[in-house]
Image (cartoon, rainbow, N blue to C red):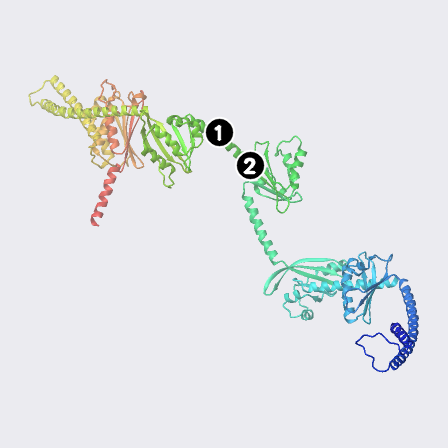
Amino acid sequence: MASSRWLLPTVQLVGSVLVLSALPARAELSLPSTVRVVGDTELIWLGVAVLVFAIFLWALLATWRLERKLGKERRRRAELEAQLNDAEAALSAEPHLLFIWRGGSEAVERIVGDMRETCTCPLDRQAQADFESWLELESVATLGEALRDLKSRGTAFNIGVKTLAGELLEADGRAAGGLATLRLRPLAGERREITKLAHESRKLARQVERLTAILDNAPLPIWLRDEEHRLTWANQAYVQAVDAETISTVLAAGIELVNPERKLNARLAANGRSQGAVDRRRSHTVINGTKRALDVVEVAVTDGEAGFALDVTALEDVERELKRHIRAHASTLDKLTTAIAIFGQDQRLRFSNSAFAKLWRLDTEWLATNPSDGEILDRLREERSLPEQANYRDWRARHLDVYKSIDTREDWWHLPDGRTLRVIAEQHPFGGVTYLYENITEQIRLESQYNQLIDVQRETLDNLHEALALFGTDGRLKLFNPAYSALWGLDTDFLASEPHIDAVFSVCRQRLPDDLMWDELKYAVTSVDDDRRPLQGRIERPDGNIFDFSLVPLPDGNTLLTYTDVTDSSRIERALRERTDALEAADRLKTDFLQNVSYELRTPLTNIIGFADSLCLGLAGELLPKQREYTNDILVSSADLLSIIDAILDLTTIDAGAMELRFEEVEITELMTDAAQMLRSRIEKRGITLQVEIPEAAGTFIADKKRLKQILFNLLSNAIGFSLDHSTIRMGARREGDDVVMWVSDLGKGMDPEFQKAAFERFKSRPGISGHRGPGLGLSLVKSFVELHDGTVSLRSRLDKGTTVICRLPSRGPRSYLHRNSLAERLPKVRAL
C-alpha cells in the first residue's frame, strides 16, 4: 500500500526528465533573471536522466513487492471473513447474549447474539445492557459483584441469574487479553436444574448470612439447642445477659439464661417432635445485678429447639400498675350512685358496679357470668323494667347499633315504675361500649318543684306591697317587682334592661334629692369588702310618704334592697306613742295619788284603831255588849282597810323598783304553820277544815319569810272567802328538783275561763260566798312577790269545782341573791390580792 502511494509521483518525475532530455542541446530556456546557468548543460541533464532512471527502477521493484503483499493480505482477509462467518453462524445456532468490555471500561463495547423466543429480555441493545430493567434485583447485585471481580482481577465466574419473569439464565464471565466477556444463555434439562440449585443455594446462603448477622446483633437474647437440649449457638445479647466473655465460654460451660423448661420437650415427645411446636412462659432472672422479667419463647425445629427472650420488666410493672389502677378504678366506680356497665367488643359484660345491679335488681352471680347486652335487655323486658315499646325487636336492634357507631348516644328512658333514667352510651377506648344509667327521677321532680317555686316566688314578689330590687355583683339590676317601679316612677322596660345602679338612682334622685343617702346606698351595693353589713333607715319624701328601707348583702354577692310604705303605720305609731305617753302620765298620776292617799289614810286609820282598842280595853269606861260588838267591827274593818293600804303601798313600791327583799333560810313547815295561825280565827269561825300537806323532808329554802307569809295569807284569805262553811281547804308544799312548790286549793265556786285570764291583774275582783267583794289586790300582790323571787304563779280553776293556786320558787334564792353571794365570796380574795 505504501509503494503504490509513491508510484504516481515517481512516474511523473521520470516523464518530466525524458521530456527535458529530448530538447536541443543549444536551445535556450526562458529562465528568470535571477537564475544563472553554472556548468555545462549537457552534464546536468545526463545526471538527471541517470537519477530518474534509477528511481524508476526502484519504483517498479517496490510496486511489484507491494502488489504481491497486497494479494497475500487479501487472501488472509478472505480466510478471516470466512472463519468469522463460520463463528457467527456457530454462535447464532444457540440463543445467547454476549457482552464485550474492553479494558476496565464500564460501557459495553459490543453485544452479540439473541435470545428471542427463549426468554423475556429487551430487544434493544442499550436496554439489554441495563440489567436492572429486566433482571431480579438480587441477580443484578450478584452479577454486578462478579463483573467487578472479572474486570479488575480477571476472575472468571459461572452463576445463575433470574429475569423479572422468573426465568433462570446462565451467566458465564471470561477474561481474554484486554477484553472481558459475559455470556447469558437460557438453560434446559439437567444443567438448568443444577444451575437452579446453585442459584437457590447462593440465595439461601446470603439469607442465612444476613439472618445470622441480624440475630447476632439483635438486642434480645437468642439461642439454639440440639436434640439433647444442649446450647449450640447464642447471640451477643445472650452472652452479655449471662455476663460471659465469649460465645465459646457460654457453649463450653452450658450457661443458661433461664432455667430450661421441660414442657416443650414433653410436648415434642408426645407429638413426635413435630416442627413448629411453641412453648411460651414468663420467667424471672438476674441480669447485670437487676431482677428482670422475661417472656421466653421456644420453638421446635428439625434438629432441636430455637428460643428467644423478651425483656418485659417494664411491661410487667405497667401491667401490675394497670391492675392496681383497674382495681382502684373499679372500687371508685363501685362507690358511685350512677349505674355503670362496660361491655366488650363481643357485646358481653366486662364490668358493672353495685349501683347497676341495684338499679335493675339483677343477681350479681348472674352478672358475673358475663351475659351479653342483648340477654340483659331481654331479662329486663321480662321483668317490665324497660320502657314500653310497640316493636321491641326494632328498638333492641337500634339500641345495639351503638357498637357500630363512634358517636356518643344519649337517651331518656321512662320506666313503667315511674322512674326516669338518662342513658349515655359511648365507645370504650379498648373497644366495646360503656353505659351510664343516671336516675334523674328526683332531679326532674326537684326541677319541676324549683320551676314551680320560681313561678310562685315571682308571683309572690309581683304581688308584694313592699318594693323590692336585687342588684348583682356588677352593680346592675337583676330583679324587681312592680311595687318598686311604681314607688319611684320607673319604666318597667327600662328596669328590665338591667340598668346600672347609677342610672336607676339618677331617676330616684328626682323624687328624693338626698345625695348623701343615695351615695351611701350605692357604696353599700357596689362595695367589694368582705364584711358588708346590712343597712336600714327611714326616708320621708317631699310628697309626705314615709318609707322604711332595708339593704341586705346576700351570700352570693348580690344585694337586696327593699322599701316598705310605713306612712299609715307611722302616723298610727305616732298617735299610739302620744296616747302611751298620756297613759303613762295618767298611770304615774294614779300611782302618786294612791301612794299619797294611802299615806294620808294610814295616819287617821291608825288613830281609829288605837281609839277602838282603848274602848275595847275599857279605858273610857265599861262598854255595853252592843257597843263592844260595834267596836270589834270597827277594829276588823280597820284591819282590813290597813291591809289594803299596805298592799297598795307594797305594789307601788314594787312598781317603783324600790322593794327590797330580805333573804334568809326559811323552814317550810314553820312557814306553813305560821300562815295557818294568822287566819285561825277566821277558819274556826266558818267551820272550815284546813289540811296542810308537807313531806317530812321538806327542809328549808332561801326566801323572804315576811313576803312568803303575805303570799300564803292572801291565798288562804281568798280560799276562805270563796269556800262554803264547813268545807275543806288544802295547803301544801313539796320539792321538785331545785324548786319549791307551794299551793293552796279550795272547793269553792271556782272561776270562769274569762276571769282566769285577768285573775292576777290589779283591782280585778269578784264577790265571795258571803257576797263580800274584795279590792282585787291579793293575787296581784302574790304574783309580784313570787316574781321578785324569780318564781312563777299558775292558777287552775273550774266552775263549782274550786280553785288551786300554785307558786314555784327557786330553792337557792333568786339570781340577784346568788349574784350577791358570789360577789361576797370573791371580794375577800380580791382584797387579799
Q: Quadrant of the N terminus?
A: bottom right
Q: Nearer the viewer, residue 630 or 660?
A: 660
Mark 1 to mark 2 CA distance (whole Å): 21 Å
Q: Say what secondary structure mark 2 lies in.
A: strand
274 to the left or right of 795: right
Name which of mark 1 and mark 2 comes first in the sequence. Answer: 2
Q: Quadrant of residue 220?
A: bottom right
Q: How many marks?
A: 2
What x and y, as percent, mark residue 186? 85, 61
Residue type, mark 2 in image = Asn
Foreground disc of the pair 1, 2: 1
Within 10 angstroms of label 1, few (less than 14), some, or many (20 or more) residues? Answer: few
388 relative to 48, above or below:
above
779 relative to 347, above or below:
above
361 to the left or right of 206: left
Q: Quadrant of residue 538?
A: top left
Give the residue number, with chain letter if any, for mark 2: 439
Q: Quadrant of residue 320?
A: bottom right
Q: Nearer the viewer, residue 127 or 750?
A: 127
Within 10 angstroms of label 2, few (less than 14), some, or many (20 or more) residues? Answer: some
What x and y, as percent, mark residue 581? 23, 25
What x and y, as percent, mark residue 369? 64, 44
Give the residue number, with chain letter if any, for mark 1: 452
Q: Is residue 604 visible?
A: yes
Residue type, mark 1 in image = Gln
What x and y, as percent, mark residue 67? 92, 73
821 relative to 755, above or below:
below
